[in-house]
Amino acid sequence: QVVLVESGGGLVQAGGSLRLSCAASGGTFSAYIVGWFRQAPGKEREFVGANGGVPRYADSVKGRFTISRDNAKNTVYLQMTSLKPEDTADYYCAAGNKNSRYSYDYGYWGQGTQVTVSS
């Protein structure tokens, strides 16, 4: 059983940066692929990126967001730069066994952290 806890969300102006953290406990975290998803108010949850062997990102964040991980700290990071108001959402990390963009491929989820980008 892997428990994931996100942190690092907050309010930032457009053009700014934030780094989200996803800390894991339980299980063998290094064996899992971690994905990031987001859900804006009134919208469906959408894929942001995943850190499989070849990291993959949604087109909307490519070149602005970067996923990294520190297995010694059981933590995965989502570095977000050049933030836009449309990046405003609740951000979730998830752990699974596939480098997938589909939420159903991830069995463990964090509770989410809110990111608000003001214009």
Image (tube, rainbow, N blue to C red):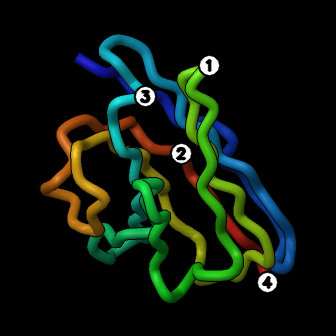
Q: Earlier in the sequence, mark 1 or mark 4?
A: 1
**Residue that numbered label 2 is attached to:** 113
Report the Cα–Cα distance between label 3 and label 1: 9 Å
In 3D space, how far apart are the residues under numbered discs 4 and 3 (Cα atoms)?
A: 37 Å
The mark lying in front, picked from 1 and 2, is: 1
Q: Position of residue 69 (x, y in %)?
A: 60, 40
Using the numbered discs, state the Cα–Cα distance from disc 1 to disc 4 in whole angstroms.
37 Å
Of all residues, the one furthest to the top in this rendering is: 26
> What residue is at 25 percent from the left and 35 percent from the top?
108
Q: Earlier in the sequence, mark 2 or mark 3?
A: 3
Residue denoted by label 4: 119
Q: Quadrant of residue 67?
A: bottom right
Where in the figure is residue 51, as x and y percent of width and height?
47, 54
Q: CB of mark 4 within 8 Å of CB of mark 2?
A: no
User: As rendered, which of 54 and 93 lies closer to the eye?
Assistant: 54
Residue at the image position 54 percent from the left and 36 percent from the top: 22
User: Distance from label 4 to label 2 (Cα)?
Assistant: 20 Å
